[in-house]
Image (cartoon, rainbow, N blue to C red):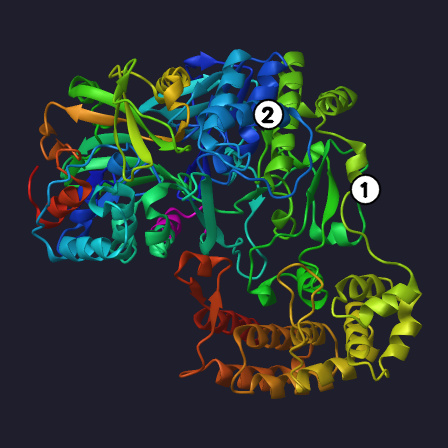
């Protein structure tokens, strides 16, 4: 019976591409891989040897482009991924809200809300692949070791310096010399609007020598460090940490090959 | 009380005992997008207790999360100008902007703060799933907010969902897409990136057709659209920040309200007398397969090539009053217009003004505990004028039609004849004799453009010259508009379909058998013949035979290149052969049933 994965992550995309996998991937957003692409999470730059031919093809094609640091560019990886995913639209349901999950005789009944309205589906196995465990939010909250709102900043002047830390912010290198990523650690319960406001206010107070480093984008998703990578929520309903991999490509490869995290 | 919901596309009502509301407000704005954010600001600043619910995690919709941070037409004035001014200051100082752009996150922040400062509340990651109804009055809504169900009581509900899903859930009537196949305009995908010179850049292109109220079709379209960003990735990939966070339909459900604005009203010169603001644009339709659009649109876009003609259009408040409900307003591109008008009344400035008006109306109605229809129109107009959203001078903005016969004669003879073709064709009583005389002119442009004008005016005298244009396969492309000019032959093919007469049928049947027709030539001829067949029962069999042969097994492949799609590095095409085969099959079935 069908497996449902909640969270259209890189790992879930790999699972969907497994030919014999009867899987449906459900997500609130309109894109795949947001847990990396839109959290601006740091990617491990250690060379990665994938187990799957598909991942190898993807990385080979990506490295053929003249990007500065292709494998550390989660958005570029996700954009490349769609050439596979557009061929299997039946395995995805995007822009979809989960209204209710109910245990039934052979598994679980999910009430979804899409642009067509309410729809009820059933599955034998349920995987919560959202970083904050959307289907089990109280446990998900307790599983958070650290929660960050990251933002991409760009050097809009030639003479601007950048320090690695100031105030409550940590700053690391971005994809190019002109880019950096600012990390702001927030309370596990912090909401996006308030976190964004605080981060903006902190950045407005940046040292004068950093005035030309300006905000290119806030993360649309939070970045997390989690305690537990796999957790049984109920029988045949488990949480898998989509961020328990060194990179988006590694997550995708693990999904494809059925590897763990 | 009833709980009204959408179930697999259908509205379902079920009786419900008095629900327990977790929160109460005066005005609930469902969808804090282009119009919704301004509605929430205006309502809160007018003293209403406002709750805004938004599916995403930011305000502003298409202008922010959607990445379209520049304006296309629209007119200045209104509460949004203050938002923009603050946003610009913030952007210039702290955001990657360049060229005085308003950074999307700066705009969202300014809108959030405006709502909160005025006492409003924002619930992000919240989706409306049901509506509590007592007869024709909405009592509240049911939402899923961060995984939890919340019931919110409200006095007035504003549907700020661009696709009208809130009004649809309430049971409002709506239309979707064009008459022939129910297809809305192609949808767009947008990416935002930092350019090499550290400016904020955006690129948008049409990615295909999607039914925005069909969950499966939407997912299919999104995956395909996102894949198209691979084109040219090496040029922008280092600076890529995001690909549109909300899906990018340009047109969704168009809700039925007390008044519906139609394209036919526009071209007939009908204008509302009590506007609350003005829209200003050209008809920026992203359609490229014009043959399948309405006859009025083809007259304007194809025969006269008036795509770029700009105009101001007065908007009454009643295009937001959802029919059948005392306290439901729609604000955004879901307002009550027809498919043709949807290409002109969706621009951000105009929608922000409508949002402001919706917020004010809702605040006034909730304050007086009355039907939205009972608010004081004069008070609304005064408030809109005070903010600059209503400026009567705006009615005179836009291009005008030439009326001087001598000048019309010159324009008809020029390479940019559209203005005169339209003016003369739609006012034959004034220009008929001149046009008839022009048909015999040695000046090819003058003679043939005059035939197009006579054709627009349904004058049979045009037929021989229109047939001549077709037989010679006249590929003259005018320069009437800054873009999207249509070849003369396409205008002639369209107009012949509207004229009775066996000679037109014979000419079109000959033409459609020419082996190397392009998609536009073929599709216009197909529709012209089907239109003629509808009226000439004795010719149906002949038309059916020829068209069945032309679209039969092994026929030519016709593909449609979508707007701006070549800018992605990949050119996005739609397979039109199968579509036209389906159109033919359905029409032949109708003829057979008759």
Q: Mark 2 lies on which chain?
A: B
User: Disc number at residue B396?
Assistant: 1
Q: Position of residue A53 (x, y in %)?
A: 12, 57
Relative to B102, say whether A186 is above or below. above
Q: Name the residue under label 2.
A: B85
**In what quadrant of the picture does the C terminus of chain A appear?**
top left
Spot occupied by residue B587 in the image (x, y as percentages of width and height): 55, 71
Q: Report the mark closest to the observer, 1 or 2.
A: 2
For the residues beneath circles 1 and 2, the answer to whether they share a chain is yes
The residue sitting at 51% across, 22% down in the picture is: B110
Q: In which quarter of the image is residue B232?
A: bottom left
**What's the residue at 24%, 56% (across, down)?**
A84
Main SS of the magenta part reads helix
Q: Is residue B487 left or right of residue B549?
A: right
Labels 1 and 2: the sequence-earlier one: 2
Above or below, comparing residue B572 to residue A66 in the picture: below
Q: What separation in Å lies between label 1 and label 2 (alpha carbons)?
A: 26 Å
The magenta stretch is B211-223
Circle 2: element type: helix
| Vertical side of B565 occupied by B343: above or below | above
- Name the foreground residue: A205 vs B38: A205
Asked if residue B220 lies in the magenta stretch, the reply is yes
Q: Is residue B136 visible?
A: no
Judging from the image, mark 1 belongs to the subunit labelled B
Tell me the crowding category of disc 1: few under 14, some 14 to 19, or many 20 or more residues within 10 angstroms, Cα based: few
Secondary structure, mark 1, is helix
């Amino acid at each position: 019976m069908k497996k449902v994965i909640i969270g259209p992550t890189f790992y879930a995309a790999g699972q969907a591409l497994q030919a014999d996998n009867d899987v449906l991937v459900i997500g609130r957003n309109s894109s795949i891989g947001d847990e990396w692409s839109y959290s601006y999470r740091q990617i491990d730059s250690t060379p990665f040897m994938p187990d799957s031919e598909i991942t190898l093809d993807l990385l080979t094609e990506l490295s053929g482009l003249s990007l500065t640091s292709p494998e550390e560019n989660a958005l570029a990886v996700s954009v490349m991924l769609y050439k596979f995913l557009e061929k299997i639209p039946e395995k995805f349901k995007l822009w979809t809200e989960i209204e209710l999950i109910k245990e039934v005789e052979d598994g679980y009944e999910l009430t979804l809300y899409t642009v067509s309205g309410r729809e009820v589906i059933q599955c034998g196995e349920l995987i919560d692949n959202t970083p904050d465990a959307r289907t089990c939010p109280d446990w998900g909250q307790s599983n958070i070791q650290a929660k960050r709102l990251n933002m991409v900043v760009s050097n809009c002047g030639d003479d601007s310096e950048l320090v690695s830390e100031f105030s409550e912010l940590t700053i690391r290198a971005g994809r190019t010399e002109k880019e950096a990523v600012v990390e702001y650690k927030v309370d596990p319960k912090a909401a996006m609007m308030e976190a964004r406001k605080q981060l903006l206010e902190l950045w407005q107070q940046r040292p004068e020598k950093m005035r030309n480093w300006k905000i290119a984008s806030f993360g649309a998703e939070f970045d997390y460090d989690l305690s537990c990578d796999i957790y049984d929520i109920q029988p045949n309903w488990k949480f898998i940490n989509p961020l328990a991999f060194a990179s988006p490509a590694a997550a995708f490869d693990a999904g494809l090959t059925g590897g763990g995290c | 009380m009833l709980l009204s919901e959408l179930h697999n596309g259908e509205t379902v009502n079920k009786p419900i005992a008095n629900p327990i509301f977790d929160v109460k407000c005066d005005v609930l704005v469902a969808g804090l997008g282009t119009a919704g954010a301004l509605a929430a600001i205006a309502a809160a600043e007018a003293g209403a207790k406002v709750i805004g619910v938004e599916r995403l995690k930011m305000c502003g919709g298409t202008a922010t999360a959607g990445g379209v941070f520049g304006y296309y037409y629209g007119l200045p004035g209104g509460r949004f100008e203050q938002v923009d001014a603050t946003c610009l200051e913030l952007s210039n100082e702290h955001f990657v902007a360049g060229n005085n752009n308003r950074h999307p996150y700066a705009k969202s922040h300014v809108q959030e703060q405006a709502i909160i400062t005025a006492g409003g509340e924002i619930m992000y990651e919240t989706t409306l799933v049901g509506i509590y109804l007592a007869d024709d009055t909405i009592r509240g809504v049911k939402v899923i907010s961060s995984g939890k169900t919340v019931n919110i009581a409200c006095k007035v509900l504003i549907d700020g969902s661009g696709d009208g899903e809130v009004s649809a859930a309430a049971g409002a009537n709506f239309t979707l897409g064009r008459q022939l196949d129910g297809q809305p305009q192609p949808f767009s995908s947008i990416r935002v990136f930092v350019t090499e010179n550290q400016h904020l850049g955006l690129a948008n292109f049409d990615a295909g057709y999607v039914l925005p109220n069909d969950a499966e079709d939407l997912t299919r379209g999104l995956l395909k659209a996102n894949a198209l960003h691979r084109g040219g990735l090496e040029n922008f990939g280092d600076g890529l920040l995001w690909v549109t966070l909300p899906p990018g339909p340009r047109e969704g459900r168009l809700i039925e309200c007390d008044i519906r604005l139609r394209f036919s009203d526009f071209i007939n010169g009908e204008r509302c007398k009590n506007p609350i603001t003005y829209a200003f644009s050209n008809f920026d339709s992203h359609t490229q397969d014009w043959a399948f659009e309405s006859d009025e649109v083809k007259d304007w876009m194809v025969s006269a090539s008036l795509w770029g003609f700009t105009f101001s259009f007065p908007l009454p408040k009643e295009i937001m009053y959802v029919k059948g409900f005392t306290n439901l307003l729609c604000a955004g591109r879901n307002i009550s217009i027809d498919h043709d008008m949807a290409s002109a009344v969706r621009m951000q400035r105009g929608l922000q003004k409508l949002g402001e008006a919706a917020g004010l109306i809702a605040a006034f109605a909730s304050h007086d505990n009355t039907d939205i229809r009972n608010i004081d129109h004069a008070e609304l107009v005064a408030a809109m004028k005070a903010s600059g959203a209503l400026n009567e001078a705006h009615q005179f903005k836009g291009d005008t039609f030439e009326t001087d016969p001598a000048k019309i004669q010159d324009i008809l003879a020029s390479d940019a004849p559209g203005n005169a073709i339209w003016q003369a064709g739609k006012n034959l009583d004034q220009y008929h004799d001149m046009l008839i005389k022009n048909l015999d002119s040695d000046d090819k442009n003058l003679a043939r453009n005059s035939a197009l004008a006579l054709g627009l005016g349904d004058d049979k005298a045009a037929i021989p010259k229109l047939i001549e244009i077709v037989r010679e396969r006249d590929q003259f492309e005018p320069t009437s508009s800054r873009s999207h000019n249509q070849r003369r032959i396409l205008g002639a093919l369209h107009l012949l379909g509207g004229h009775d007469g066996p000679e037109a049928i014979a000419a079109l049947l000959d033409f459609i058998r020419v082996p190397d027709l392009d998609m536009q030539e073929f599709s216009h001829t197909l529709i012209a013949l089907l239109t003629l067949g509808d009226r000439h029962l004795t010719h149906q069999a002949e038309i059916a035979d020829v068209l069945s042969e032309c679209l039969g097994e092994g026929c030519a492949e016709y593909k449609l290149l979508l707007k701006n799609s070549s800018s992605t590095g990949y050119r996005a095409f739609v397979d039109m052969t199968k579509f036209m085969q389906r159109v033919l099959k359905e029409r032949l079935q109708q003829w057979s049933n008759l």
